[in-house]
Image (spheres, grey):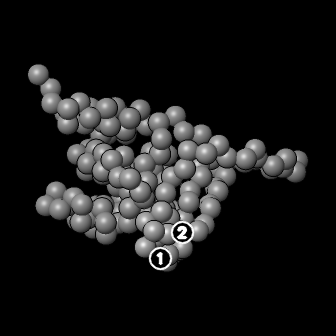
Amino acid sequence: MSSPTHLNDEVVAEHIRLTGARATPARIRVLQLLRAAPTALTHNEIELVLGELALDRVTLYRVLDWLVESALAHKNTDAHRVFRFSAAAAGEHTTHIHFRCEHCGGVFCLDAAPPAAPILPAGFSLSRMDFDLRGRCANCTASK
């Protein structure tokens, strides 16, 4: 009988394979971590959470860049200009809204519907829209 972790491994591996790429243990581990994280994580935070399962820095950077290029993850900068990574939702559209805490630097994915795309001039082609809301997260507001 398969364990819940094994089933989760297979689901994540299948999402990776759907991109046409190999589902390597490193890709599976990092994508699982991003999906389980309540907020976007920095490279360093990912290393700390992986603990003894951590990859070497270069491999982790490559895995994160590949996940972003494959539309399985998002890469955004926080208020301190540090890159943070979050898992893309299954079947996600090209738009994604974030709330950025100006105090702690946290980046939170929102379930709010994004505004409609503007009408573009002739010959323009939209590939992505980014929306950032800024302020203080619940934790920072409570600790004022």
Question: Mark on residue 16?
Answer: none
Determine the residue positioned at 38% across, 53% down.
38
List x then y, in percent, for residue 23. 29, 40
In the visual, does 73 lie left or right of 34?
right
Question: Mark on residue 144?
Answer: 1
Determine the residue positioned at 38% across, 61% down.
41
Report the front residue among 93 and 40.
Answer: 40
List x then y, in percent, for residue 50. 22, 58
Badge 2 amino acid: Arg
SS state under label 2: loop
SS state under label 1: loop
Badge 1 amino acid: Lys
Report the front residue among 48 and 141.
Answer: 141
In the visual, does 85 lie left or right of 135?
left
Residue 55, above or below 95: below
Report the front residue among 114 and 64.
Answer: 114
In the visual, does 56 lie left or right of 120?
left
Determine the residue positioned at 15% across, 30% down.
3
Residue that lies at the very extreme toward the left in this rendered image: 1
Residue 52, above or below 1: below
Report the front residue among 32 and 61.
Answer: 32
Dividing the picture into quadrants, the one containing residue 9 is top left
**In this orientation, does residue 105 appear?**
no
Determine the residue positioned at 36% across, 59% down.
62
Observer-side mark, 1 or 2, equals 1
In the visual, does 14 lie left or right of 79?
left
List x then y, in percent, for residue 138. 48, 62
Q: Label 1: few (<14), some or many (≥20) within 10 Å? A: few
Q: Label 2: few (<14), some or many (≥20) within 10 Å? A: some
Task: Please name the residue that numbered disc 2 is placed on.
Answer: 136
- In primary-sequence order, the first of circles 1 and 2 is 2
Disc 1 vs disc 2: Cβ atoms closer than 8 Å?
yes
